[in-house]
């Protein structure tokens, strides 16, 4: 896995990246609206992303230090940012992907396009509050075609009791929750795309489940965190793969 810098000279990043060599299994540090211009139609199998929620420090599950308003300062976590940046990116996701899964939070759910299916992560141990009680569910929006439609129905909602997979990001998703979504939404070797990669959970889940990834993240600090986690996940997969290859070689010799 190699890195792709945010800028090269004065040209737009999309003009300097070649598909697929500069995209697949890469973390691209840049603006996803710019980078996606260089991605062909229907070039990825699944978009799986957890974008900013637009709460600007508002209350949610977890501690204050892990609140959605505690990003690094590269962008403003506001309703306006969701409308102008996230929704704009989502429209391009529909162009480049066969299916899209997004966890948008509930605060600005009204800004999102009509979804094809709806689910949620139910969190029975949630600590956050909303006006009518506990903030114990987070929506999941499904767009596009389910690849096993009519063959194997998948649950659209899940119980979530797992802790976040990374403490270096204000709202990292639990890795096993992301693995569940991946395994139910596309086959192995699929290309998974996350335009708001954050600390890299989508890429790590893709590696652990035998899938490829493309990640874009605008914050250089989070890019470095993601790259470190991805390298660790790849090393672990290599460790698991070598004993299996050695055993297969022994069987062939016999």
Image (spheres, rainbow, N blue to C red):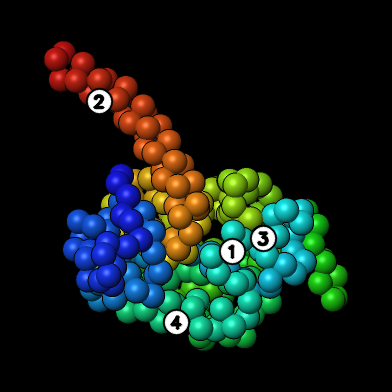
Q: Position of residue 167 (x, y in %)?
A: 62, 45
In the image, is 188 to the left or to the right of 170?
left
Q: Mark 2 highlights which residue?
A: 245
Secondary structure of the residue carrying numbered label 2: helix
Secondary structure of the residue carrying numbered label 1: loop
Q: Residue at x 25, y 25 (%)?
A: 245
Q: Is residue 121 above or below residue 176?
A: below
Q: Mark 1 highlights which residue?
A: 73
Q: Residue farthest to the front? A: 9
Q: Residue at x 15, y 20 (%)?
A: 252
Mark 4: few/some/many CA within 10 Å (<14, 14-19, 20+): some
Look at discs 3 and 2 and give the one toward the viewer.
Answer: 3
What's the CA distance linking mark 2 and mark 1? 46 Å
Look at discs 3 and 1 and give the one toward the viewer.
Answer: 1
Q: Is residue 100 visible?
A: yes
Q: Mark 3 highlights which residue?
A: 70
Q: Earlier in the sequence, mark 3 or mark 2?
A: 3
User: Do the CB atoms of the residues marked 3 and 1 lie less than 8 Å apart?
Assistant: no
What's the CA distance linking mark 4 and mark 3? 23 Å
Q: Earlier in the sequence, mark 1 or mark 4?
A: 1
Look at discs 1 and 4 and give the one toward the viewer.
Answer: 1
Look at discs 4 and 3 and give the one toward the viewer.
Answer: 3
User: Do the CB atoms of the residues marked 4 and 3 lie less than 8 Å apart?
Assistant: no
Residue 88: assigned label? 4
* Of the pair 128 and 125, the residue shown nearer to us: 128
User: Do the CB atoms of the residues marked 3 and 2 lie less than 8 Å apart?
Assistant: no
Mark 3: few/some/many CA within 10 Å (<14, 14-19, 20+): some
């Amino acid at each position: 896995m190699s890195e792709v810098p945010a800028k090269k000279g004065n040209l737009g990043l999309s003009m300097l990246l070649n598909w697929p060599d500069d995209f697949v299994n890469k973390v691209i540090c840049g603006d996803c609206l710019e980078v996606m211009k260089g991605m062909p139609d229907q070039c990825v199998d699944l978009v799986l992303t957890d974008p900013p929620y637009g709460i600007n420090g508002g209350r949610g599950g977890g501690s204050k230090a892990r609140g959605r308003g505690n990003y690094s300062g590269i962008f403003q976590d506001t309703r306006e940012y969701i409308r102008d940046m996230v929704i704009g990116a989502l429209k391009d996701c529909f162009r480049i992907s066969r299916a899209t899964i997004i966890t948008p939070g509930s605060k600005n759910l009204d800004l999102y396009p009509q979804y094809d299916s709806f689910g949620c992560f139910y969190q029975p141990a949630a600590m956050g509050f909303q006006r009518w009680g506990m903030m114990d569910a987070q929506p999941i929006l499904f767009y596009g075609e389910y690849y096993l439609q009519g063959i194997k129905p998948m649950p659209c909602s899940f119980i979530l009791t797992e802790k976040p997979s990374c403490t270096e990001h204000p709202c990292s998703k639990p890795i096993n929750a992301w693995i569940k979504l991946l395994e139910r939404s596309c086959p192995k070797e699929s290309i998974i795309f996350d335009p708001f990669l954050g600390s890299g959970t989508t890429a790590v889940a893709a590696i652990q489940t035998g899938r490829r990834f493309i990640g874009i993240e605008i914050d250089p600090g989070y890019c470095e965190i993601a790259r470190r986690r991805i390298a660790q996940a790849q090393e672990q997969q290599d460790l698991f793969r070598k004993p299996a290859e050695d055993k297969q070689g022994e069987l062939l010799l016999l």
